[in-house]
Image: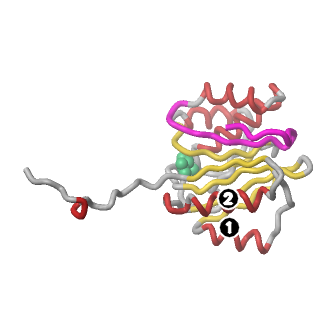
Amino acid sequence: MGWLVQDDIPTRKVPPMCGIIGYIGHQDAQEVILDGLRRMEYRGYDSAGIAIESEGRLTVAKKAGKLANLVSELEGHAIPSSSHGIGHTRWATHGGPTDENAHPHLAQSGRVALVHNGIIENFASLRDELIAEGIDFHSETDTEVASQLLGLEVEKQNSLLEAMRVVCNRLEGAFTLVAIDSEDDSSVVA
Ligand code: GLU
């Protein structure tokens, strides 16, 4: 048996972990969210995205690769100014690191946008059920089942918070979700 002195302790290798952020307030959401994503870059990620709500509409921008790719996308195609939004740095588990698979994901209605950290283990059966109900999927992620379920549920509940409660009860796995509703500019639900 030997003793480890401080210098012998190897650098701890932290597994990559996505970054997830929501903002509502008086500042520019895009600025706050990009700054938050920059601070979480050290965790490791393969793509990044942002969704903001402005005047009852959601706008999403997302890009595979470094945050700099998202920033240049936003320089080329400015999104409306807003003080309400969500952002994400992804570490892919389901579906490759592509623009389509990057978060946020929208519901088919376009009413809600959602970001997700973790894994939804029962996504395959939920996806089949949603496809049978006429939902078209635009990504290979497990995450999109949550955004699609949330989009359907928010129409029934007319409350993002209540809809999130119902949807979380249907999901199995270890996950964190953050979402915004284009019809409610007063909340971010996590
Ligand atoms: N499982 C999700 C995906 O593959 C989320 C991964 C993450 O936590 O970044 O998109």
Q: Does the magenta segment cover residue 137?
A: no
Question: Can you give x and y, in whole percent of width and height, for residue 54 in the image?
Answer: 87, 52
Q: Residue at x 20, y 59 (%)?
A: 5
Rendered residue at 71%/42% (across/down): 179
Q: Which residues are magenta?
A: 172-190
Name the residue that disc number 2 marks: 49
Kindly identify the residue that appears in the image at 62 percent across and 67 percent down: 67
SS assignment at label 1: helix
Q: Residues within 10 Å of mark 1 (few under 14, many from 20)?
A: many
Count neighbours of disc 2 (C-alpha within 10 A) and say few if under 14, some if 14 to 19, many if 20 or more: many
Left or right of 142 in this view: 160: right
Q: Position of residue 136 (x, y in %)?
A: 72, 44
Q: Amino acid at mark 1?
A: Leu
Amino acid type for the residue under numbered disc 2: Gly
Q: Is mark 2 within 8 Å of ligand 1?
A: no
Is residue 88 visible in this depiction of the protein? yes
Circles 1 and 2, Cβ within 8 Å, touching? The answer is: yes
N-terminal label among 1 and 2: 2
Residue 31 numbered mark, or none: none
- Separation of residues labelled 1 and 2 (CA atoms): 7 Å
Element on which disc 2 rests: strand
Residue that numbered label 1 is attached to: 70
> Is residue 180 in the magenta section?
yes
